[in-house]
Amino acid sequence: MTDRKEFRDLATPAEARAALDELDLAPEPETVSLAEARGRVLAERVDATIDVPGFDRASMDGYAVRAADTFGASERDPVVLPRVGVVHAGEKPRVSVGEGECVEVSTGAVMPDGADAVVPVERTSESDDEVAFETAVAPGDSVMAAGADVAAGERALGPGTELTPREIGLLSALGVDDVPVRGRPTVGVVSTGDELVRPGDALDHRRGQIYDVNSDTIAAAVADAGGIPRLYPHVGDDYDELESQLRTAADECDLVLSSGSTSASAVDVVYRVVEDAGELLLHGVSVKPGKPMLVGRIGDSAYVGLPGYPVSALTVFRTFVAPRIRDAAGVREPASASVSGRLAVRVRHGEGRTRLLAVGLVTDGRGETLVYPVDKGSGATTSLVDADGVVEIDADTDYLAAGEAVTVELFSPDVRPPALLAVGEDDPTVSRTLDDVPDPRYLGAGSRTGVRRLRDGVPDVVVVSGPIEPDDPTEELAAWTREWGLVVPTGNPAGIGGLRDLLDADHRFVNRTTASGLRATLDARLDELAGDDETGRALAERIRGYEHGVRAHESPARRVADGAADVGLGLRASAERLDLGFVPLGDEPVRALANPERTGKDGVRALERALDERT
């Protein structure tokens, strides 16, 4: 029997942050060209070595004068002066302004000697070589004096300044070409697990293979935090292979992040590699999700082990690791990285450890932000896009009440509530229609789930099919029908003609989940077929595989196409899309129903218009 390494005493979130603070991630400062400086952070102060501007400059088109010569000028009684020359921007003046004279100047031109003001051209009129001035000016009017913007020797920008286009402009004006900036930590990203396959490579579901989600996801998050991600090939659970990869990454990076293989099972070897190759500072944090988190050192590099599930990995990274990368790079946390809102539903907790609850955002009819849980389980990759951020719940909190104010730490500062949140039946018409709606979010969780979420006040719109009826008031946006029946292999080799052919037969049947309206339609049909001595439920028990339900409308058809099932509950549209046979059983009604308090939202109106064009 292989020894099993159990988690050590779980650290608190505060202890985990303290362990991360011990790690030095900051690389040495570097010098970059001005063209490469946008978004970087100054490593040291930059002082002006020249005056900006370096000369007295006309700030508008007009005439350079001695201000005293315009005293008393007005539209009724203009002062007339002879024009003795012209100075354009970018040229050295070849003329000076004597008493009672003027010189024509363009914006940005060097002020000629003797002049101390500029009269705007709009307040003058010229005839031959004389200019009539219709207003008086004071010394300095419409003139930018040398050094008025930045004076030589003055502190221009301080260390820690993020270089945006405006700072780039100032450095350009100062003639700075090479810019001293904070180094950005290089972060190695290693995904572990024998089951992983890189996106684009062939996948074998029979071997339990899954695509490597974490490598590109975490690399993108590293870049968002100000680091330089470096992807390494994923490795299996072999000790020697893993040790070699982590050591290589540690030699080349300031921080190494691995995901997966951090739990306390016999095959998980990351913590052993870290202990042997460096120092393990922390193994396990009292937080959900994210309990199997590691912090340590490998050689001179910092190391953090993230959980394997993508949502857990991104949540732990966002909460614990991203702030340290920002600190090392000198990047400030975006001001919009969190939002406040009210919980749409009651959230139970009472688990004795800090919880990082994945949540989504939606605006109600008054434009206020509502926060709702997105809980598909740690392994659900779609939570990456269904969730907008996390709410941190203290370990000693039993529950959060509906309506309670919470702060959401966003996965990205660019996150905004969708223009439309709809929940309900997975349906091809809905899928096509949403392409015509700006910024929608659709959760195809089934008709029953949509009705339940509507009761909680979460969605703007629910889509229901079959006999399922909401108890709450709604406003119908659109209604249509879809043809339902049995999806069979091309040519229907078993000669299936209807539901009765499935009773007590050896055909492998695949159903929809109990949340689906189509499942409810099937159950209603079985009730109709049942005689006086039998119930629809009894008939269902005579169908092999009736209890095997899959979520999406096309899922049963795909099982048939893959040979994993002989017949599936589905739609004609799915059968035709996959070139399969179809046994029709009827038409099922589908309705899009709006929360009456949200009908004024732009997203709801856009959906109504789009459905009207398609149904």
Image (cartoon, rainbow, N blue to C red):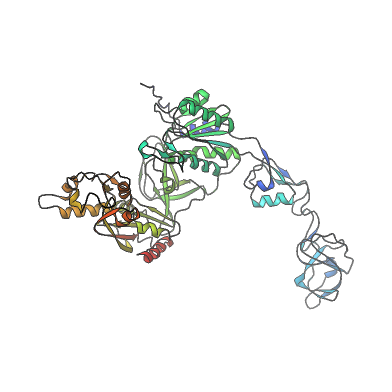
Residue 475: image location, x then y, percent: 33, 63
Residue 303: image location, x then y, percent: 52, 31
- In the image, residue 604 sits, relative to residue 245, either above or below, namely below
Query: Which residue occupies 45% across, 30% down?
Result: 11
**Where is the N terminus found, in terms of image quarters?**
top left
Residue 484: image location, x then y, percent: 27, 56
Quick one: 269 or 486, which is closer to the camera? 486
Quick one: 491 or 538, which is closer to the camera? 491
- In the image, residue 139 sits, relative to residue 455, either above or below, namely below
Residue 393 shows up from this direction: no
Residue 486: image location, x then y, percent: 25, 53
Residue 516 shows up from this direction: yes
Picture quadrant where residue 611 is located: bottom left
- In the image, residue 408 sits, relative to residue 16, either above or below, namely below
Q: How many marks?
A: 0
Query: Which residue occupies 43% across, 62% down?
Result: 602
